[in-house]
Every structure is written in structure tokens, then in C-alpha cells.
């Protein structure tokens, strides 16, 4: 049976093998494994790419979120951590790390609903929640889910009006743009993951924070190295969260392919859009007028709900088409968030999405025929 994988990292490695091997070889020769020259070079490239003053490489995307929040607590409150009475608004329809970072930074996640068209946090709900929790909410974490940018014009305007910070979760949106600007460049901090499956992926865990604020950048640089400029005289409660030199080397080699791969993902999305547009029981992804979607995932929603989603997933698997459900359980329903979060209003759109979304293969090096084949199987499926 012809297999159609969600992602083929072996294929991608073969495509970039010469560049990756050469970059790793340099590390083997200089042996500067901790904050080696590749880390600084990558930070400079990403900062320039994002149009931002600072980029700090960190150990993972999860750490990028946590370190940003810790730095913002130090900057805005003069405290090591936020308190449980500090609410940080975010979406419940995201990966665990988004909400977990809020808890680990000492604050309370305040979950608001998503826009059912984009799967992203609703600016309208953010504004409503801020009216109810005036003075309690200190920040917002918009998540550019699936590579689809949030409406950052509205979100940053609301944040400015209410004097709260914005920490963008860009784990899935490397290369995405809103109104011509890269995601990560709108807020007080932009948090990236370079997990192997991301649009720009390392050979293990890796991440980065971008910011235009000198103070925030300096604090994060301290926090990644045990909390101090002098490792024998720490100033803050820190971490060992440096970006590995060898991961930076891999990312440098892959960096030049990132935009081209994003374009390939968009072409695959076009094939799906064209072939699935007349299926009335599927809702296709939406690219907003001001948005540039990079399709970390190509995610559809079955209008019939979870039962049919699971049936379709099983049927596609039986025919060699790999799929995934991101994310099947809203954060507020997870054990870790019970009695540790606040909920504003109904989260019905998040709930509907969690029970009915399905991501299709969007391997950037996938032959067009495979995308066509996956779409054909869906067209043959009967509810």
C-alpha cells in the first residue's frame, strides 16, 4: 500500500544532507559546544528575519514561553514570578505548553474562546474578558495555531488600551505574516519552537525568543544561564536553558530552505482546497485577508463532530493516509489545570473544534500526486 505520511523527516534530511552535514562538521572541528559561534549566528539571522532587535536561543519552545513570562514578571512587577491573582489570557485550544508555561510562571491561565473560522483566539472574547477582569489580567498569549496568524492588529490594540503585555506563541508559525510583518514581531516577546516537526525544525528540542526590548532580552539571557551574568553570583532564579550549539548548526543549515518549504506547504494546501471545496461536510482552513498562512498543519473540521472525525481518520489510515487530531482535549479539561485556571464565558467553539478537527499530510517535499490521492480518498468517504 502506498503510504502518505504526515511528515517525512528522512526525506527532508536527504534533501538538505550536504548543507546539514557540513554545518555539523564545523562543530566537530571547533568543539565549542556551549554557546558556540553557531548560536550567535542563528540568533542574528532570526532577529534580522523577524525584523526584531534581539533573538535569544533557548532549549525548547516551552522554555521560550516560560522564560518570556518570567522576564516580563521581573520587568513589570519586579518579582521573580507572577502571583495566582495575575491572570494571563490565552486559548484553551492549543498544546499543553501554552497554559503550562503560565502556571510555571506563577500566574493563572484565563481561557477564552476561539474564532471558529480561524481556530485562533477571538479578539472579541479577549476584549470582553478584560472588561470583566479589569485590573486582574496582566497579559495575553495569542497562539498562531497551525501556522495561521492571529489578528495581531486587533490584539495589540486591545492590549495597549488595557496596558497588558503580549507574548506571542509562534511555535507553529515560523515564517507566517500578518499585515506583512512576521509573527513574533508584534508583541513584547515572540516565542518559537524548533521541535523537529516544525516548519523550521532542529534534530531535537530547541527554541528562541525574539523581542525589541533591551531589558527583556537581557533578563532572558540571564535566566537561561542560571539567572545571572556571573555564573558564580546569580541574581534571579534561573534555568539551564541554552540552545545547544549543534542544534543551532542544524537550524542554520535548514534556515535557507524555510521560506521555500513554506511555499511548498501552501501549494499542497491549494491542492487540498481545490479538491475538497465542494464537500459540504468539511470546513476547510481559512486564510484571512491580512494573513500569510504557513500550514504547519493543514487542518479541516468535520461538521458532523467527533464520531465522524474518528471514522474518517480510521478509514484514511486503512488506506495509508496518516492524519492527526490536534488537539483532542481542551486545556481547561486537563487534570493539571483543574482548580488552577479561570474560564470566561462559553468555550463552545473550542469544544466543537477539539472533537472534530483532523490534520492531513502536508509534507513539503510530498509529490502533488500524494496530496491529490489523499483528497481523493476523502471524496470517496461516505458519512
Image (spheres, helix red, strand yellow):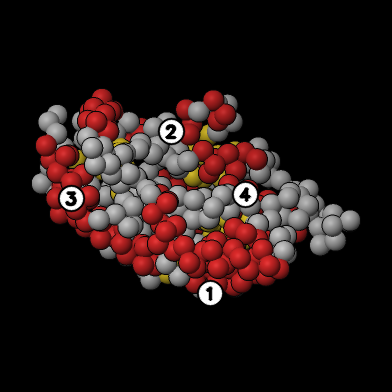
Mark 2 and mark 4: span between their CA atoms? Answer: 21 Å
Q: Indicate whether 355 appears above or below 272.
A: above
Is residue 123 visible from the viewing direction of this image? Answer: no
Q: Which mark is residue 330?
A: 2
Q: Are marks 4 and 3 in contact (CB under 8 Å)?
A: no
Choose top left, top right, bottom left or bottom right for residue 351.
top left
Give the CA separation, mark 4 to mark 3: 38 Å
Q: Mark 1 highlights which residue? A: 48
Tag 1 or tag 4, which sits nearer the N-term?
Answer: 1
Crowding around mark 2 (Cα neighbors within 10 Å: few <14, some 14 to 19, many 20+) is many
Residue 177 versus residue 68 in the image, above or below: below
Looking at the image, is mark 4 or mark 3 nearer the viewer? 3
Nearer-N-terminus badge (4/3): 4
Report, in whole angstroms, how far the alpha carbon at label 1 lies from the one at label 2: 35 Å
Q: Give me the disc on residue 63.
A: 4
Q: Secondary structure at mark 4?
A: helix
| Residue 255 rendering spot, x and y as whole percentages | 48, 67
Q: Secondary structure at mark 3?
A: helix
Q: CA distance from mark 3 to mark 2?
A: 31 Å
Above or below for 104 versus 310:
below
Judged by depth in the image, the label closer to the viewer, 3 or 1, is 3
Image quarter (top left, top right, bottom left or bottom right) of the N terminus: top left
Do callouts 3 and 1 mark residues in contact (Cβ within 8 Å)? no
Mark 2 residue element? loop
Whether residue 186 sits left or right of residue 33 in the image: it is left
Per the rendering, the mark at residue 372 is 3
Looking at the picture, how far across and down is residue 211, in whole percent?
59, 65
Q: Of callouts 3 and 2, which one flags the residue occurring earlier in the amino acid sequence?
A: 2
Amino acid at each position: 500500500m502506498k503510504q502518505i505520511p504526515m511528515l517525512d523527516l528522512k526525506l527532508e534530511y536527504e534533501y538538505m544532507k550536504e548543507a546539514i552535514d557540513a554545518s555539523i562538521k564545523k562543530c566537530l572541528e571547533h568543539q565549542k559546544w556551549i554557546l558556540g559561534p553557531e548560536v550567535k549566528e542563528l540568533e542574528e539571522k532570526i532577529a534580522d528575519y523577524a525584523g526584531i532587535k534581539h533573538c535569544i536561543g533557548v532549549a525548547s519552545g516551552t522554555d521560550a514561553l516560560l522564560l518570556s513570562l518570567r522576564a516580563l514578571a521581573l520587568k513589570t512587577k519586579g518579582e521573580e514570578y507572577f502571583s495566582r491573582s495575575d491572570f494571563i489570557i490565552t486559548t484553551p485550544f492549543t498544546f499543553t505548553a501554552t497554559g503550562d508555561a503560565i502556571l510555571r510562571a506563577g500566574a493563572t491561565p484565563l481561557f477564552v474562546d476561539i474564532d471558529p473560522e480561524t481556530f485562533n483566539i477571538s479578539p472579541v472574547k479577549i476584549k470582553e474578558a478584560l472588561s470583566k477582569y479589569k485590573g486582574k489580567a496582566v497579559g495575553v498569549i495569542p497562539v498562531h495555531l497551525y501556522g495561521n496568524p492571529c489578528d495581531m492588529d486587533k490584539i495589540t490594540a486591545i492590549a495597549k488600551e488595557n496596558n497588558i503585555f503580549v507574548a506571542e506563541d509562534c511555535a507553529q508559525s515560523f515564517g507566517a505574516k500578518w499585515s506583512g510583518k512576521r509573527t513574533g514581531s508584534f508583541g513584547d516577546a515572540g516565542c518559537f519552537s524548533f521541535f523537529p516537526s516544525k516548519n523550521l525544525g532542529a534534530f531535537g528540542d530547541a527554541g528562541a525568543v525574539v523581542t525589541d526590548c533591551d531589558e527583556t532580552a537581557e533578563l532572558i539571557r540571564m535566566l537561561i544561564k542560571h539567572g545571572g551574568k556571573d555564573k558564580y553570583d546569580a541574581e534571579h532564579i534561573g534555568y539551564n536553558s541554552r540552545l545547544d550549539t549543534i542544534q543551532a548548526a542544524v537550524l542554520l543549515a535548514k534556515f535557507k530552505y524555510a521560506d521555500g518549504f513554506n511555499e511548498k506547504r501552501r501549494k499542497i494546501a491549494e491542492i487540498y482546497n481545490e479538491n475538497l471545496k465542494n464537500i459540504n461536510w468539511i470546513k476547510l482552513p481559512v486564510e484571512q485577508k491580512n494573513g500569510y498562512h504557513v500550514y504547519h498543519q493543514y487542518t479541516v473540521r468535520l461538521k458532523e463532530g467527533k464520531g465522524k472525525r474518528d471514522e474518517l481518520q480510521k478509514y484514511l489510515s486503512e488506506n495509508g493516509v496518516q492524519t492527526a487530531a490536534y488537539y483532542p482535549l481542551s486545556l481547561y479539561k486537563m487534570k493539571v489545570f483543574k482548580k488552577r485556571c479561570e474560564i470566561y464565558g462559553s468555550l463552545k467553539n473550542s469544544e466543537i473544534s477539539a472533537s472534530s478537527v483532523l490534520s492531513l499530510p502536508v509534507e513539503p517535499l510530498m509529490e502533488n500526486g500524494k496530496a491529490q490521492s489523499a483528497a481523493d480518498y476523502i471524496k470517496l468517504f461516505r458519512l
